[in-house]
Amino acid sequence: MLEQEQITQDKSKHGLAAGDAFQPERADWTIDQGWDRYTAEEHGVWKTLFERQTKLLPQRACKEFVEGMKKLPISADKIPHFEQLSEVLMKHTGWQVVAVPGLVPDDVFFEHLANRRFPAGQFIRKAHELDYLEEPDVFHDVFGHVPMLMNPAIADYIQAYGQGGLRAKELGVLHRLARVYWYTVEFGLVLEDGAPRIYGAGIASSRTESVFSLEDDSPNRIAFDLDRVMCTNYRIDDFQESYFVIKDLDALLELAAIDFQPVYDRIATRPDLDPGTILADDTVYHRGSGRYHANKKSVAK
């Protein structure tokens, strides 16, 4: 049975794990990366994670992820320097990477994204935590997210999400928009040459979910529909029961340009859906067996 690299905090909330204990010196919660303070052991953890993911992702990750990785100053030998990453990103898409102590409050997170700043945890997991993590670290944030920020469609989409998040919080519908982020930026698949490929950071940075999301018979793989996704709950502590597949990355540009208010109004009275639900009008690329989660429930009982 597969074991997942678990990130147990709800990343759609973007914060309060660090926020409850950490008192920032800066209003925007940024800190110095402190690159010179990384130890040889920490660089070694990065090397282990980097090498096993780069072996897995060819033919699984979308070409935009692979191309973005090649153009960035990222290698197996050492944890990347945020200033060097930002220098390259700024030239391509106007983004930069800023160091934060971990998860940050929602409004801080959205404000950074709205201004094309990607907040990345500057710490790295311990050697005994390769497959279990309580909150996103530098490997998840940099290896998983930053290569896709080299793509103009993703760059614009994530900025629009930051702008939309501030508005959604005011309207009290942040949970709706958070589901869109979860099923795209974190756990999204995209069609490439007729087959799903990985672009979501939560998958790209996870050894076992890289395989599970594409090759296991258990999860559903369903065509992305905005209303449908906004009504669909997700799992925060295990593999997803359903993955949503966009037709191409330009579809995210369409999402970035729409007015979400009519969508919020349209789905306001619709019930929430369980993560593994398939609807009659879904376009289904793969109807999952549900085996993985059914087995876990059986064992728990």
Image (spheres, grey):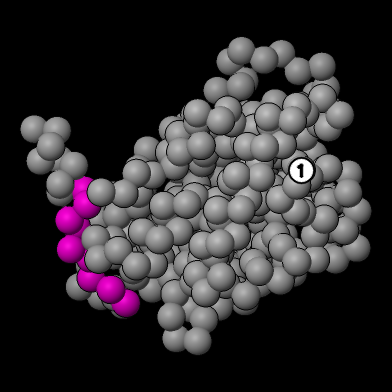
Q: Is residue 91 above or below residue 270?
A: below
- x and y percent of residue 130 in the render? 51, 37
The span picked out in magenta is: 285-293
Q: Which of 108 and 166 is in front in this view?
A: 108
Query: Which quadrant: the C terminus?
Result: top left
Q: Which quarter of the picture shows residue 45?
A: top right
For the question of whether residue 173 can be seen, the reply is: no
For the question of whether residue 44 can be seen, the reply is: yes
Relative placement, left or right, of 11 versus 234 is: right
Residue drawn at (38%, 44%) of the image: 4
Q: In this view, does 103 lie above or below 217?
A: above
Q: Nearer the viewer, residue 154 or 254?
A: 154
Q: Circle 1 sits on which residue?
A: 78
Relative placement, left or right, of 155 versus 227 is: right
Residue found farthest to the bottom: 193
Relative placement, left or right, of 270 versus 246 is: left
Callout 1 secondary element: loop
Which amino acid type is shown beneath numbered disc 1?
A: Lys
- x and y percent of residue 100 in the render? 73, 31
Is 286 contained in the magenta span?
A: yes
- x and y percent of residue 233 in the render? 34, 48
Is 182 contained in the magenta span?
A: no
- x and y percent of residue 193 in the render? 50, 87
Task: Give the number of callouts.
Answer: 1
Residue drawn at (52%, 81%) of the image: 192
Relative placement, left or right, of 25 versus 9 is: right
Residue drawn at (45%, 34%) of the image: 132
Say few, some or many: other residues with alpha carbon within 10 Å of mark 1 (under 14 / 14 to 19 / 20 or more).
some
